[in-house]
Amino acid sequence: MEPLRISIIQGATRWHDAAANRAYYGDLVRGLKGRSDLVVLPETFLSGFTNETLGNAETMDGEGLRWLRGLALESGATITGSLVVREGERCVNRLVWMRPDGSHLQYDKRHLFRMAKEHERYAGGEERLVVELNGWRICPQVCYDLRFPVWLRNRYDRAAQRFDYDLLIFVANWPSARRYAWSTLLRARAIENLSYCVGVNRVGVDGNDLHYSGDSVALDFLGQPLIELGAQEQVATVVLDPVALAAHRERFPAWMDADDFTIVR
């Protein structure tokens, strides 16, 4: 592992306007060219968090993915965030992990926010994604997944002598009415999993008249903030230190006392 440069883009996503969002977020990402290894965008950054799925869904061979692929190549950084994606008769809230070489991985949001009836309009994912970048193992997740610690548990593989992941990422549209839960749960996930944790939220007001206060953050393995953003549109970059992470895991090996379990659905 080497130090990892990670950039947070806390934007004001345009409501139901994919072209405007491509222009808006594209300019922000291009400004990071050569200065970041990983760029993190909010949840549903091309549409806003919408239940009007059919009119706002992308396809995996559509304009949104072509744009994201070109942007990763142009910026020289891996880019991640989630999109509303249609596959046949179903829609998913899909996090895309787009690499500069044009290859990508994907994760479909597992936990669907029933209070906004997301579970009625989207299908949930089944598989947790762990990706590798510059020697780091990274687990990217989407918004409401933050509330489910069993799904997120960072286990140690004694045979491989490694943790599931070193960095946990959440992309979100998390309304300001629940900002205390957002901040508290992000810190808990970092502390309990002996991992860096990054949460990227949007700002502004969406088409459902929901207000978003941002509060994007990068936390170390003690839950201490490395960077904290407020309620404004903002781009920030932080460098994560692998040496400090390894030292903490060595001197505070709570993973050795963790419970074994199996996730079933």
Image (cartoon, grey):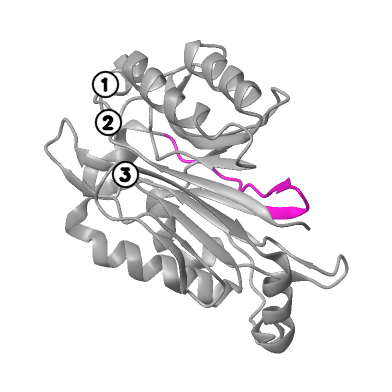
Q: Secondary structure at mark 3?
A: loop
Q: Which mark is residue 16?
A: 1
**Which percent across, then down, holds residue 76?**
66, 30
Label 1–label 2 contact, CB within 8 A = yes
Gap between marks 3 and 2 measured at Cα: 10 Å
Asked whether residue 59 is drawn in magenta, I would say: no
Gap between marks 1 and 2 measured at Cα: 8 Å
Q: Residue at x 32, y 31 (%)?
A: 121
**Which percent across, then down, holds residue 137?**
71, 55
Q: Earlier in the sequence, mark 3 or mark 2?
A: 2
Q: Secondary structure at mark 2?
A: loop
Q: Residue at x 61, y 53 (%)?
A: 139
Q: What amino acid type should be assigned to the residue bearing mark 1? A: His
Asked whether residue 134 is drawn in magenta, I would say: yes
Gap between marks 3 and 1 measured at Cα: 14 Å
The quadrant in which residue 85 appears is top left
**Which percent across, then down, holds residue 156?**
74, 71
Q: Earlier in the sequence, mark 1 or mark 2?
A: 1
Q: Is residue 216 above or below residue 13?
A: below
Q: Earlier in the sequence, mark 3 or mark 1?
A: 1
Please give left or right for residue 211 compared with residue 94 in the image: left
The span picked out in magenta is: 123-137
Whether residue 265 is visible, yes or no, is no
Q: Residue at x 30, y 36 (%)?
A: 120
User: Which residue is at the front of the view, 262 or 23?
Assistant: 23
Q: Is residue 49 above or below residue 262?
A: above
Whether residue 50 is visible, yes or no, is yes
Which residue carries the number 3 mark?
Answer: 173
